[in-house]
Image (cartoon, rainbow, N blue to C red):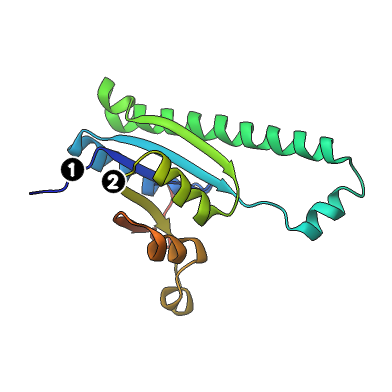
Amino acid sequence: MLPKIETILYTTDVEPSAVYVFRYALALAQQHHAKIVAVHGMEPLTPFGQNLVEQYITHDVSEEMHKKARETIKTDLKKRIELLCAKECDNTPSCENAVSSIHVVEGYPSQVIMDVAKDCSADLIIMGEHSHNIFSEIVMGGTTRKVLHSATQPVLVVQIPKDYKD
């Protein structure tokens, strides 16, 4: 029996190349009549960095700045996804509504991805890889490698072309 793909977790950064990976998520969602859950993990400041920041501003101000940053990223991500859906879907309503939710979470990206994948019962994780030299091809990026080794569901790693421009 073929596996059922109902929920696709699309991991994204805020790079322009994220569009390339999203197209794969959208194509698979259309083929399987699946929903897409988008996630972006914002790496937290190190304790040293947090202490340095809090020498100049209060902890409450720092927390408020982080909250605003998360909201800004979420808003920008939502706008970008809506524009891409409109462009790629040719006004097909089911396609334009393929993304059911967007999560912007502060934490180590690989752990954020694993947590959201579990919470949304993802059947497939789709993420991009930016490797463009021999060293990075041998040793994948930390987030990709950690997700590949920790995920309990299949992971599709989309290699982003070196010269990709949208």
The C terminus: image quadrant: top left
Residue 38, image x, y percentages: 43, 39
Q: How many marks?
A: 2
Left or right: residue 72 versus residue 59 is: left
For the point 47% across and 47% down, which residue is it? 115
For the point 92% across and 46% down, which residue is it? 56
Left or right: residue 94 versus residue 118 is: left
For the point 49% across and 30% down, which residue is it? 78
Residue 111, image x, y percentages: 51, 54
The answer to whether residue 19 is visible is no
Q: Name the residue that disc number 1 marks.
A: 4
Q: Name the residue that disc number 2 marks.
A: 123
Task: Identify the secondary structure beneath mark 1.
Answer: loop
Asked whether 133 or 163 is in front, the reply is 133
Residues under numbered marks 2 and 1 in contact, where contact means CB atoms less than 8 Å apart: yes
**Is the residue 104 above or below the residue 91 in the image?**
below
Residue 102, image x, y percentages: 47, 34
**Residue 87 quadrant:** top left
